[in-house]
Image (spheres, rainbow, N blue to C red):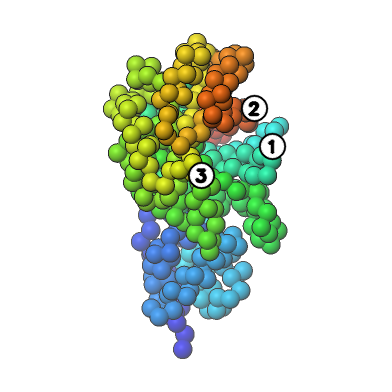
Amino acid sequence: MTEIGIQKSEKPPQFPLPLRGRVRVGGIERSSLAGLSRKELAEALRAINVEEGAIKMRVEQLWHWIYHQGVIDFAQMKNVAKDLREALAAAYSLARPEIATQQVSVDGTRKWLIALPADNLAQKSHHVECVYIPEQGRGTLCVSSQVGCTLNCTFCHTGTQRLVRNLSASEIVAQILIARDDLRDWPPERGENRAITNVVFMGMGEPLYNLDAVTKAVTIMADGEGLSISKRKITVSTAGVVPQIEKLGKGTGAMLAISLHATNDELRNQLVPLNKKYGINDLLAACRAYPGASNARRITFEYVMLKDVNDSVAEARALVKLLKNIPAKINLIPFNPWPGSNYECSDWERIERFSEVVFNAGYASPVRTPRGRDILAACGQLKSATEKLGYRARTLQAE
Ligand code: SAH
């Protein structure tokens, strides 16, 4: 008895995935299964008439090959019956979104500019960036959750780009697949010693404005039968969308990072305009209540060092006072300049003095070494290359 009614035809069955999940393979538009949840994979199997009783087992097989082995060809799925492999290949693909450009910094940081299909055919494709930062004993992938951003933080380059759209969960997950492909970070080549050990949602966009997709993506990433990136190694950074913080903790169990950057509302209103809606007191109350926060699972507070704006010793003391009774880590980020920015990075002595106050108060206060500045891959610089590419793409089209 065959479990599938294979109908070989030129046109693959129409599977109700959003348009943005589809890719063209050999001139035929096929939905990609890469990035989907178990439930969606089950639907994809039903759409090609896989027998109901076999769905669960087949989903587990697909899951293993897609997320544990990272295969990009159904033919490699050795334990899947040949007729099913053929039916899958006729209907679907395992393609990832297209890499528009890729850059490698002198310090080993890598940045991929990824082209995503637009919302409708009248628009051109959108671009998001994804950055890999190798460090001693670990490697962090910084992923984007939106194309552009609506927050308009005054020191952030991404903020000057208008929001184009939210990413789907599969587009968020696909960033990991793309990076693992490129870093050859799949077994058997890599074994247990993975290049990507940590994921941070610190790329383009505000993850808590796209919480459903982020939650779904974290669940897929953290699944032990697949990508297997532990929830403790996944950090979601927010500028402070207070009403969503508890939901994030309950829905994902991910680590939380807060882009604080100022110790009083007046200054924070200027730097992070979202603060006018949710002030520092409310934000810190949400942090105190964050599900699962403890000394072993601290909340990271990011603080960008802006010359003569927020970098005084008095502010360092105020920061320490503010975070009292919160299991916190403080991450000082030297400001990364971008073309047209109105700020400068604090002098090094000033950063050191600030860091000393924080350290003396009992916090590890690592100063985040700027990585990938030469390829504009550092915090807050994610935009320029998109614009450059936009320009290049336009000129190429015109030629
Ligand atoms: N919207 C989320 C996710 C972005 S994370 C958030 O705000 O947390 C990107 C981090 O880099 C944030 O802490 C952001 O404030 C910081 N950042 C933005 N622009 C920067 C710049 N030019 N230099 C250094 N850090 C910057």
Q: Which sits in the foreground, 141 or 317?
A: 317
What residue is drawn where x is 50% and y is 55%? 222
Give the Cα distance between marks 3 and 2: 35 Å
SS for dot 1 = loop
Where in the figure is residue 343, as x and y percent of width and height? 50, 15
Q: Which sits in the foreground, 390 or 85?
A: 85
SS for dot 3 = loop
Residue that protrudes farthest toward the top in the picture: 308
Where in the figure is residue 3, as x and y percent of width and height? 45, 82
Give the class, few, some or many, for how many residues have Cα within 10 Å of label 2's Cα (few <14, many ≥20). Answer: some
Where in the figure is residue 394, as x and y percent of width and height? 51, 32
The amino acid type found where label 2 is placed reads Asp
What residue is drawn where x is 37% and y is 37%? 288
Circle 3 or circle 2, nearest the eye: 3
Query: Which one is earlier in the sequence, the residue at label 1 or at label 2?
Result: 1
Query: Which one is earlier in the sequence, the residue at label 3 or at label 2?
Result: 3
Circle 1 or circle 3, nearest the eye: 3
Count of marks, rendered view: 3
Tell me the residue that label 2 is attached to.
374
Where in the figure is residue 27, as x and y percent of width and height? 51, 58
Give the Cα distance between marks 1 and 3: 30 Å
Give the class, few, some or many, for how many residues have Cα within 10 Å of label 1's Cα (few <14, many ≥20). Answer: some
Query: Which one is earlier in the sequence, the residue at label 1 or at label 3?
Result: 1
Tell me the residue that label 3 is attached to.
296
Give the Cα distance between marks 1 and 2: 11 Å
Tell me the residue that label 1 is attached to.
108
